[in-house]
């Protein structure tokens, strides 16, 4: 009988590239894998994959009511479906996995995609932060097996909660195709990801006034979707800023290949963002696409090693406009960054990182038996 692993998230599974990679790799290695999320009113049919996918319906769609309802539904689902390993993805699904794994005497894993209590949406709300911190300090120490996406985040969470966090980076599956945009074409900036607080999206939009002729593509949706669309109208930038909405992973890769420059403009509004290592950074590299990031530790480390980014010392309209114009005008530097991405992509991909993932889970089963 195959070893069974359940993964739990709060999204609707369709656009979660990270979990699709993880589940796909484990399924290909012979595990019985089930990815459990939620069904939303806007959910589209799931693509057939090599692992099982389950979406739990919820009456509430946001806020504390959603989290309470989803965790209750998830608890009973896990209680009546047995796995050998229950894996909680981030803090918002940790309690059902902890409780059910204890009830059934099974192994449990904590996969921290981010430092949950240090994301901007939580940091700016003291009551909410205290609530999640209590859950974190009670639950995470009861997980022997933990991992996260960046070494800096791992060190922080090990210090805060006790268990050693290993690192499995959120890097893409290797692709043969790469971006080959011409600098004499309309210069296009691409942001891929959720449209949420702390992503520097307002700065990116306002910067377009200083970049006449350029375009900004925003691939994703989120809490700020309506506000950002209003800002574009307010600034009369409808001709330059385009909202692409949610895109399936394959469609997003196609869009990335058409852009000139990737954006990842995280604001320093919490330790999670400051010490982050976003998957979009690796997605841009894999596409051979130069990109702009903040001068935060993880990106600075990659820059020293591979020279694939343009790093901003401050998040401001002037700083972003200046950096984009520099890459538009200095074609030799832009092309050098392109070539460096093509070299780095052979190392920064899932073919390498997958080995760490498989070893992590194999060690758990070997120890357990």
Image (cartoon, rainbow, N blue to C red):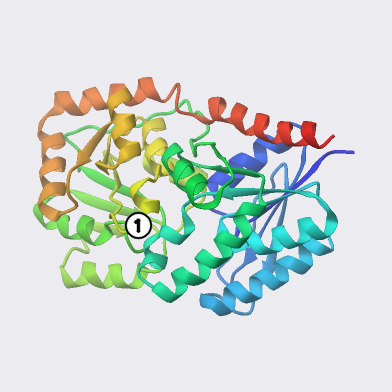
Helix, strand or loop at label 1? It is loop
Question: Is 345 left or right of 209, judged from the image as shown?
Answer: right
Of the pair 59 and 50, the residue shown nearer to us: 59
Residue depicted at 78% across the width and 57% down the height: 102
Question: Is 169 left or right of 180, judged from the image as shown?
Answer: right
Of the pair 347 and 218, the residue shown nearer to us: 347
Q: Where 69 sits versus 112, above or below?
A: below
Question: Is 284 left or right of 51, judged from the image as shown?
Answer: left
Q: Can residue 177 be seen in this view?
A: yes
Quarter of the image for residue 151 reads top left
Residue depicted at 67% across the width and 45% down the height: 144
Residue 149 spot, x, y in % from top left? 49, 41
Residue lying furthest right:
1
Residue 20 spot, x, y in % from top left? 60, 45
Residue 275 spot, x, y in % from top left? 37, 45
Residue 294 spot, x, y in % from top left? 25, 44
Disc 1: which residue: 270
């Amino acid at each position: 009988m195959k070893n069974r692993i359940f993964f739990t998230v709060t999204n609707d599974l369709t656009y979660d590239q990270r979990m699709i990679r993880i589940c796909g790799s484990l399924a290909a290695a012979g595990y019985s894998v089930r990815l459990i999320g939620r069904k939303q009113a806007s959910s589209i049919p799931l693509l057939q994959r090599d692992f099982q996918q389950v979406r739990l319906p919820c009456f509430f769609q946001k806020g504390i009511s959603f989290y309470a309802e989803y965790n209750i539904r998830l608890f009973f689902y896990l209680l009546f479906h047995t796995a050998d390993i229950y894996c909680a993805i981030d803090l918002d699904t940790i309690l059902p996995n902890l409780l059910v794994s204890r009830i059934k005497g099974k192994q449990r894993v904590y996969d921290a995609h981010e430092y949950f209590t240090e994301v901007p949406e939580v940091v700016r709300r003291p009551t909410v932060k205290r609530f999640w911190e209590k859950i974190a300090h009670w639950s995470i120490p009861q997980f022997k097996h933990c991992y996260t996406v960046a070494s800096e985040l791992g060190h922080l969470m090990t210090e805060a909660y006790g268990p050693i966090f290993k690192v499995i980076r959120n890097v893409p599956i290797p692709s043969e195709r790469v971006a080959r945009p011409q600098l004499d074409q309309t210069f296009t900036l691409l942001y891929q990801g959720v449209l949420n607080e702390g992503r520097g999206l307002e700065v990116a939009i306002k910067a377009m006034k200083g970049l006449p002729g350029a375009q900004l593509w925003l691939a994703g949706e989120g809490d700020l979707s309506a506000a950002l669309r209003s800002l574009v109208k307010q600034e009369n930038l409808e001709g330059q800023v385009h909202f692409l909405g949610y895109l399936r992973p394959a469609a997003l890769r196609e869009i990335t290949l058409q852009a000139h420059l990737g954006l990842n403009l995280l604001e320093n509004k919490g330790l999670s963002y400051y010490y982050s290592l976003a998957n979009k950074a690796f997605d841009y590299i894999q596409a051979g696409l130069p990109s702009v990031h903040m001068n935060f530790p993880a990106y600075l480390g990659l820059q020293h090693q591979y020279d694939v980014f343009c790093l901003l010392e401050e998040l401001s309209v002037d700083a972003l406009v200046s950096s984009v114009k520099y890459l538009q005008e200095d074609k030799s530097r832009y092309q050098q960054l392109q070539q460096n991405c093509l070299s780095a992509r052979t190392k920064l991909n899932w073919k390498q990182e997958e080995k760490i993932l498989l070893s992590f889970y194999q060690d758990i089963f070997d120890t357990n038996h």
